[in-house]
Image (spheres, grey):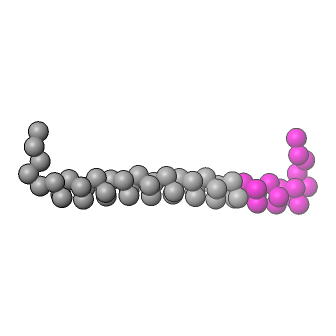
């Protein structure tokens, strides 16, 4: 298979790599924020008198 427009293919591949990187970064960021929210919620529960198991 011969590509007649190699720069178009390279541009598409660069965009695809950028999207993959963004999705990994956003996934890591959302996981970190979920952990921080969970940590805050458990802290508030303890302040309100909830027992830790």
Q: State whether the magenta stretch is mostly helix, strand or loop.
A: helix
Q: Which of 31 and 11 is in front in this view?
A: 11
> Which corner quadrant of the image does residue 48 belong to?
bottom right
Q: Using residue 38 as the reference point, say whether residue 19 is left or right of it.
A: left
**Measured from the top left, where is residue 47 in percent x and y?**
88, 60
> Which corner quadrant of the image does residue 30 belong to?
bottom right
**Measured from the top left, where is residue 38 in percent x and y?**
72, 54
Q: Which of 19 and 4 is in front in this view?
A: 4
Q: In the rendered structure, does residue 25 fall within the stretch colored magenta?
A: no
Q: Considering the image in quadrants, where does the C terminus appear?
A: top right
Residue range in magenta is 38-53
* Residue displayed at 70% across by 58% down: 36
Q: Using residue 27 as the reference point, say whether residue 21 is left or right of it.
A: left
* Residue displayed at 58% across by 58% down: 29
Q: Nearer the viewer, residue 16 or 33?
A: 16
**Measured from the top left, where is residue 18 in percent x and y?**
38, 58
* Residue displayed at 76% across by 56% down: 39
Q: Which of 12 and 32 is in front in this view?
A: 12
**Vertical comparison of 51 with 1: above or below:** below
Q: Using residue 34 as the reference point, say whether residue 49 is left or right of it.
A: right
* Residue displayed at 80% across by 54% down: 42
Tally the marks: 0
Q: In the rendered structure, does residue 41 fall within the stretch colored magenta?
A: yes
Q: Considering the image in quadrants, where does the N terminus appear?
A: top left
């Amino acid at each position: 298979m011969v590509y007649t427009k190699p720069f178009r293919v390279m541009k598409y591949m660069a965009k695809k790599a950028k999207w993959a990187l963004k999705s990994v970064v956003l996934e890591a960021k959302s996981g970190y924020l979920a952990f921080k929210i969970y940590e805050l919620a458990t802290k508030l529960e303890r302040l309100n008198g909830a027992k830790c198991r």
